[in-house]
Image: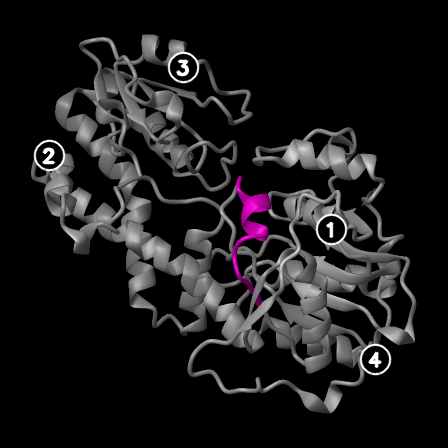
Amino acid sequence: MAQAGPTSRLSRRPALVVRVAGAPLPLRLDRTVASRYNPRVASFTRDVCVIGGGGHVGLPLALTFADAKLRTVIYDTNAEVLETIAAGELPFMEAGGEALLALVLAGDRLEFRSTLDLLHECEFLVVIIGTPVDEHLNPDLTAIRRLLDHCRSSLRDGQVIILRSTVVPGMTEYIQRYLDSEGLRIGVGFCPERVAQGKSLEEFTTLPQIISAVDETTLRRIRQLFDPFTSEFIELEPREAEIAKLMTNAWRYIQFATVNQFYTLATSDGLDFTRILHACRHNYPRMQGMPSPGLTAGPCLMKDTMQLAAFSRDGFVLGHAAMMVNESLPRHLVQLAKRQTDLASARTGILGMAFKAGSDDSRDSLSYKLRKILVLEAKSVLCTDPYVRDATLVSLEETIRQSDVLFIATPHAEYLNLDIPAGKIVIDVWNIVRDGSGR
């Protein structure tokens, strides 16, 4: 496996292995099968295949691998997205992404496939696919099992499968048992991504990498894969790593729910929450970490909180409470507007459809839930966003001009201190229009 060369954007640094305080040393890995996953049983013409490599997490990781001089394959069933990437264009926003894509394409270090014909040639298979919850808010395991069945004939001894997607605790061991039952000598590990969307390329190389595997040999090989661009590793048991990722997202979700609950309580009584929040935080160190209120959604936070709740056998009361608070905020904003006007006869506009500021990703955005409510409550609804690709959206100017009531749903920088004509009602949970604070 090739190492990063002098032309790479990555700076090679000595890696540091960190283990969580209190964890047993060494880890309780399965040593009875440690010798089974020997890379010498097969030769590989490619280093790594990123399964689901055309998405927001998979593509930046594939570019990082290729930049480290690894022979990298992107496998994705969306052939149209692969054509876009192969032409040198990113299908979504990622800081530094287009320049790095051009670099690795020029170096002929990246291949694209919508079929499985190269899967058996890759030593490492990094799985990045959706892991949703079902209609009962329980983990939906069908996508991963379907993928395993689909790829079964292309798997071979000596490979390593690395789960990168958030999974319910126990999934790594479940996949290992599946492969063992199929007679395959393949190691399995879980190495969660923890990057902020749009900043993946930067954070892949600066944040510690959690690694875990079912056996020692696989853990060592995984460390070697990430070593060219990772300076610090945290080794955990697979279940410890799985629950650590869920806890990270659930913690953020609960933090936002807490301040959203405070916002709802204060504004329901007609109070100015911005003044209250300023009083709480100003020159008071113990409140500096308190975020501002706002629509809290996206493809991870709520889903992963519910996965943790399912793991707890529905005993994660804080998680369920956070979901109820965050998911109810759009309706509360509509109620605030109804206090100020007859919404049924008002034209409304939503500014921002992405799930977070500065992003073009609208997956699971609560802006769309807000739109559904307003379709029933208001005379009309217009929506705008400077980044989201949606044929139903209109320009910012038209949205402002035609609307009687404006909802600031996403705190894009374009809305900072926006000049709103007098007489229009503005519902701005982020407080971005008035003084440009936001979250």
Q: Earlier in the sequence, mark 1 or mark 3?
A: 1
Magenta range: 198-210
Q: Badge 3 is on which residue?
A: 396
Instruction: Identify the amino acid type marked 1.
Output: Ala
Q: Which residue is drawn at the image coordinates 82% and 34% (left, top)?
A: 106
3D distance between C-alphas at marks 3 and 2: 27 Å
Q: Give coordinates of residue 49: x percent, y percent.
A: 77, 54
Q: Earlier in the sequence, mark 1 or mark 4?
A: 1
Residue 11 lies, with reference to residue 335, above or below; the image says: below
Q: Badge 1 is on which residue?
A: 68
Cβ atoms under marks 2 and 1 closer than 8 Å: no
3D distance between C-alphas at marks 1 and 3: 42 Å
Apparent side of residue 397 relative to residue 262 in the rendered image (left or right): right
Residue 136 seen from this side: no
Q: Give coordinates of residue 329: x percent, y percent.
A: 27, 41
3D distance between C-alphas at marks 2 and 4: 64 Å
Query: Disc 2 vs disc 1: which is toward the camera?
Result: 1
> Dot 2 surroundings within 10 Å: few (below 14), some, or many (20 or more)?
few
3D distance between C-alphas at marks 1 and 4: 33 Å
Task: Describe the element under mark 4 as helix, strand or loop.
Answer: loop
Quarter containing the N terminus:
bottom right
Label disc, if present, on residue 183 of the rendered structure: 4
Q: Badge 2 is on which residue?
A: 272
